[in-house]
Image (cartoon, rainbow, N blue to C red):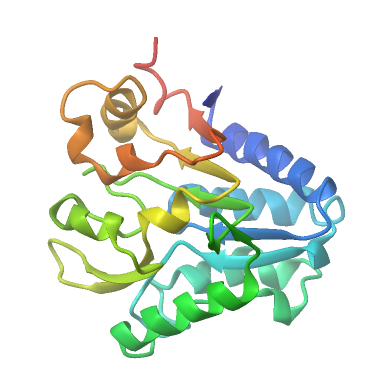
Amino acid sequence: MKINISESKKQTAKSFSEYLAKLVAKNNILHVALSGGSTPKEVFKELAEHFKNKIDWSKVQFYWGDERCVPADDAESNYKMANEYLFSKVELPLGNIHRIKGENKPEEEAARYADLLEAKLPVYNMQPQFDLVILGIGDDGHTASIFPNQISLWNSQSYCEVAEHPETGQKRVSLTGNIINNAKEVAFLVTGQNKAQKVLEIIEKKGNYNSYPAALVAPKTGRLNWFLDSEAGKLIE
């Protein structure tokens, strides 16, 4: 496990962007699963502004760790955010974007996306393997769209499942634990003091950590990277 703590949200975005640029440079093709949320938005802005010409975008194949079941032009769409802040601003072939189609029937889309991953990704441990899965952590300890009240979905034999937000009931298509932990590398992007307690519990295995889906992230390769700002990492010893 590597823990990177930066002074600010912007510095965290820069640190992660440098890490991604190095990964792209040393691979002929890089299969990356993106996350939604405010921290990835900062990363997308940093990549578009300062790494537009430093990364060979034709080498990067983009997927998602989860998606809300909304149309692609909806304000809540993870795809829309990535497209608005990154894809539309760099030279990225359209064929390199593999979105979860939130407008489709959730169960059918989860099955379709699982098939797509099986067809597009290289195989390792007899399962599809991402080169990098980017994750966040919710205030409740959820990651991707696996929430504490549906933690059993983490252990699903399917690569994708339909989850429901515990408060709004909104349906989401999410990767499951088997494919997340089969990735070559996993990177948590976490900022803000409201995440500090969960970060502490998960990293140092304290409190109720084992009830949080995010605590189940343990890539088989051992390559787990944390990118935190000073507020999210302030309780780490």
Decide if residue 24 is in sight here: yes
Residue visible at 53% across and 61% down? 126
Residue visible at 41% across and 80% down? 74
Q: Is residue 208 left or right of residue 99?
A: left
Image coordinates for residue 218, horizontal then vertical, percent: 42, 38
Above/below status of 12 relative to 82:
above
Closest to the observer: 13 or 22?
A: 22
Q: Is residue 54 left or right of residue 187?
A: right
Labels in figure, total: 0
In this view, the residue farthest toward the top is: 237
Q: Is residue 42 left or right of residue 104?
A: right
Decide if residue 102 is in sight here: no
Image coordinates for residue 136, horizontal then vertical, percent: 41, 47
Closest to the observer: 133 or 88?
A: 133
Query: Which quadrant of the figure has residue 221?
Result: top right
Above/below status of 78 relative to 214:
below
Q: Is residue 156 left or right of residue 217?
A: left
Above/below status of 172 relative to 26:
below
Image coordinates for residue 142, horizontal then vertical, percent: 28, 48
Position of the C terminus by quadrant: top left
Residue visible at 41% across and 67% down? 159
Image coordinates for residue 62, horizontal then vertical, percent: 63, 66
